[in-house]
Image: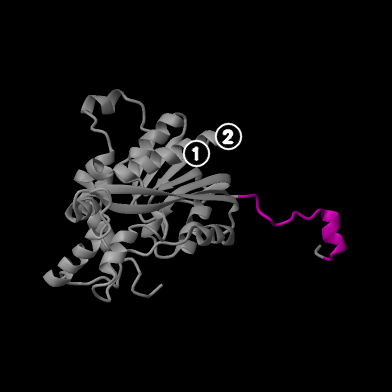
Amino acid sequence: MNDGHTIDKRRVRAAFERAAAGYDYAAILQREVCERMLSRLEYIKFTPDVILDAGSGTGYGTRKLVMRYPAARMLAIDIASAMHVQARPPVSWWQHVFARKTQTGYVAGDIEQMPVKDSCAGLVWSNLTLQWCNDLKQTFSEVHRVLQTGGLFMFSTFGPDTLKELRQAFGKIDGYIHVNRFIDMHDVGDILVHCGFATPVMDMEYITLTYDDPISVMRDLKAIGAHNATEGRRRGLTGKTAWQAALSLYETLRTEGKLPATFEVVYGHAWKPESRKSVLTPETRRQLGLT
């Protein structure tokens, strides 16, 4: 992908490094979506031995998964090392001496190229991370690689209607990209199948947050590191006239005294099936002239 929608990963990493310390205070949506993902596990009879939390952030989902699967080993991967600093609980020297070996490991890495071995996880969990990927086929292929046969991939991401109000307001003031691009739920499902996953299940819902003013919207997005990281973004500051025009357009969307910020949340899960390669008996191989 080389168009203006390409995500600048260095900018993403830097944004989340800066946001790490105050992330939990603002990440209300991320926690809510995580809880809704966890509730979906109630209907899946599956107990993984190793769980990989891809895009683990400050560890909210990691800790919840540890509580649900106390016998499982956890591996938390995030592109920003500062997120791991916030995720790791403070441990005194004597706890290091007497406590049992930790069941959670922390690795800095990108979900599009994870620094872990093949077939290492029974469950790959990813909450609101896929929207930061440039190549979803590459990402799903990576997840397929690290999953054990029979393993489960469970994720959430954002769909195309996410931040539609900001897109509408800023899209009319210039030719720059002001909001990241998000992939349609049906396309996500098709890519899962293309990458070898079986029986994908997809669903979607809208979650709308409301704010008193546009600055509060921007402040929250900044606090969770959700900057516009596309290559087609404006490199300098938006001019005062254009900024005021965008805010005026946004104000026309005010409902019952509040400004809406809509998020289209896409949920999905799929399984890594047994290899489709058939196993030939010695007799069949002889008949086919293969021996």
Which contiguous range is marked in magenta? 273-289
Residue 168 appears left or right of 267: left
Q: Where is residue 288 in the image (x, y as percent from the top left)?
A: 84, 64
Marking on residue 222? none
Name the residue rendered at 24%, 61% in the picture: 250
Residue 150 appears left or right of 138: right
Q: Closest to the observer: 82 or 93?
A: 82
Residue 181 included in the magenta stretch of the image: no
What amino acid is labelled 2 in the image? Lys
- Disc number lying in front (1 or 2): 1
- Whether 230 is drawn above or below 114: the answer is below
Residue 93 quadrant: top left
Q: Position of residue 17 (x, y in %)?
A: 23, 52
Q: Is mark 2 on a helix, strand or loop?
A: loop
Pointer 1 or 2: first along the chain = 1
How many numbered circles are shown? 2
- Whether 115 is drawn above or below 63: the answer is below
Marking on residue 45? 2
Q: Position of residue 100 (x, y in %)?
A: 36, 26
Name the residue rendered at 31%, 60% in the picture: 165
Residue annotated with mark 1: 40
Task: Tell me the chief SS of the magenta region.
Answer: loop
Q: What element carries label 1?
A: helix
Name the residue rendered at 34%, 45% in the picture: 30
How is this picture coloured? Answer: one colour
Residue 181 quadrant: bottom left
Q: Residues within 10 Å of mark 1 (few under 14, many from 20)?
A: few
Q: Closest to the observer: 153 or 188?
A: 188
Residue located farthest toward the left when viewing the structure as drawn: 240
Residue 281 visible (yes or no)? yes
Q: Closest to the observer: 41 or 11?
A: 41
What amino acid is labelled 1 in the image? Arg
